[in-house]
Image: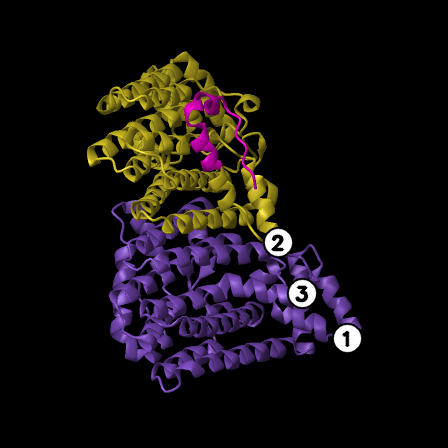
Chain colours: A purple, B yellow
Amino acid sequence: MTLKTASPLTRLLGPIRADMEAVEREITRMTTSHTPAMEALLRHVGRFAGKRLRPALTVIAGRMCGAVTPQHHTVGAIVELIHTATLVHDDILDESAMRRQVETISRRVGNETAVLLGDYMFATCFKEAAALEDRFSSRYLAEIVEVVCRGEILQVHHRHDADMSEETYFRIIEDKTAALYAAALRCGAQLSGASREHQDALANFGYRIGSAFQIIDDILDLTGHEDAVGKSLGTDLEKAKMTLPLLRLRERATPEGRARFAAAFGSDDAQQRRSVLPLLAEFGAIESARETADAMVESARTELRHFSGAPEVALLLEAANYILGRDR
Amino acid sequence: MTLKTASPLTRLLGPIRADMEAVEREITRMTTSHTPAMEALLRHVGRFAGKRLRPALTVIAGRMCGAVTPQHHTVGAIVELIHTATLVHDDILDESAMRRQVETISRRVGNETAVLLGDYMFATCFKEAAALEDRFSSRYLAEIVEVVCRGEILQVHHRHDADMSEETYFRIIEDKTAALYAAALRCGAQLSGASREHQDALANFGYRIGSAFQIIDDILDLTGHEDAVGKSLGTDLEKAKMTLPLLRLRERATPEGRARFAAAFGSDDAQQRRSVLPLLAEFGAIESARETADAMVESARTELRHFSGAPEVALLLEAANYILGRDR
């Protein structure tokens, strides 16, 4: 299958175009199957082709710490496919119908095939990782998939929990989302022979921008328009997930507003839960969450002090800005 | 968590008890989590504790081809956990309520957590495989998980297909079930430094007994009693899967019987599909399928000619007989 990218980010990342093309070839190689049924499924998943932000981070980290090798392209492709496999399974969890303007796998061919296809893609990732000459990434990436799943399980566990703490929220998003950004950067650095200190700095940068990304995603799920964002929205309220805007609403509302929030969010009826939406504007909850995302990126920036003068710092900051400014 | 085994097979396999205890310790180590939510889930999955047939095969193959090392115990535990992870996901696919006398994960905590827990367990397996000194198993086991998923996807694809060929049936069961038996044996042999010829012979033995196992499983799904078998039955007809007894019914029935089969199996109503059951007895379809399972084990036996004189041959044959004789 061929995965096409046409995002503004790809243009922003012009300086690493040749490497990103090599990543793309690796993705195509890894997702080509000899069985027609598999081929059709993988081709459909290919239509989710995203921003390739994670492999870009692997390549950039490699350049910052030394030379980019074919192993960087392979690891970048693996990280992207891990991400895609989690999306295939997430769409089952969320009962979503749309993903990046196309039908989700679960909607198109049923939950059963979606479960199996996600499993197949994870297995492909681990097979490719196991074949790498460098042995760090295969163990580390498997650990990260554990972390991602643990974060998602924690989130499911806290559904309908109007009293969930912010600490739990940040733990969930670090695990389910930010850990894979951190891993993309750490692997890129490690494959270029970076010191542990440099690896940690880049991983910390990844944790922070990954968390910012998830906060923005959570805001869009409440306030975005499906046509612009290209995926099913409103699923967090549908599934009674407490996300940062709701936590900030709970914190900032008057006692009367808090009571309205508690009544709406506590309803068994998903339609009723949507009546929290006007409260978000009333109490500035979206702005508060957005400020936290901004602060996360600011704090990410400080991690890059270890690399002052490196031309790739600008690329990483561009990626971070893209995350904050994105409207889709 | 602790996984307890108390099957007749464990007694049969007395000669490898010390190794099987080491496998058990590895399983416990791999499924211990620091998060209370994960720990509770893994403990519940531990209650599915099965026959440990696959790790026993890894250990026996190791003894047949050389010395059993701690890596055999680790790989045996990994193979068992891969199997368990596929069960967690299978129970979602089959909408089963019971597995080995206990509630399935999907029934207990919902499909979403079941998807994520299966993913987590696969990741654990690949993390452990990646940490092995020997590099063969990690790549090979990931490939086998691809094969297992491909087989299951092919099966979903052929639901409601009353015209499915026997060739397709055997391809499905080789991929979804037998491949993991073959892998358990091949890894055991490979880790003991076996020749390619010996590895292949043991893998072929595994393919044949694994296929026999699945045929018996498919027979039990149609004819067994849930109390005795300890899991939800009748799911194959529920999901309109063509299994060997039905293929043999289609082949052996009179034209009138075939028409009744086609009408019943082709029904959209699962209850209606159950009216194929009396036809199975009428046309000796169960016996025919059982004879094929017997023949598979007979053909498996011939693969062991490479090892004539080895005391472990008797253990493998005992395992094979156990498969054929099992009533649960």
State which tag comes first along the sequence, 3 or 1: 3
Which image quarter: residue B161? top left
Mark 1 → mark 2, Cα distance in angstroms: 28 Å
Residue shown at 69% from the left, 77% from the top: A282
Residue A174 appears left or right of A10: right
Res. A278 in view: no
Q: Chain of mark 1?
A: A
Q: Of residues A68 and A247, which is closer to you in this image? A: A68
Q: Position of residue A291 (x, y in %)?
A: 58, 80
Residue B185 appears left or right of A266: left
**In this view, A66 is above or below B189:** below
Mark 3 → mark 1, Cα distance in angstroms: 19 Å
**In this view, B281 is above or below A219:** above
Q: Tag 1, which secondary structure?
A: loop
Residue under label 1: A254
Residue under label 2: A157
Q: Chain of mark 2?
A: A
Q: Tag 3, which secondary structure?
A: loop
Res. B34 in view: yes
Task: Tell which residue pokes out farthest to the bottom in this image.
Answer: A309
Q: Position of residue A188 (x, y in %)?
A: 35, 69
Q: Chain of mark 3?
A: A
| Magenta stretch, residue numbers | B1-24
Q: Tag 2, which secondary structure?
A: helix
Q: Are marks 1 and 2 in contact (CB under 8 Å)?
A: no
Q: Position of residue B209 (x, y in %)?
A: 34, 26
Q: Amino acid at mark 1?
A: Thr
State the predominant SS element of the stretch in magenta: helix
Residue under label 3: A165
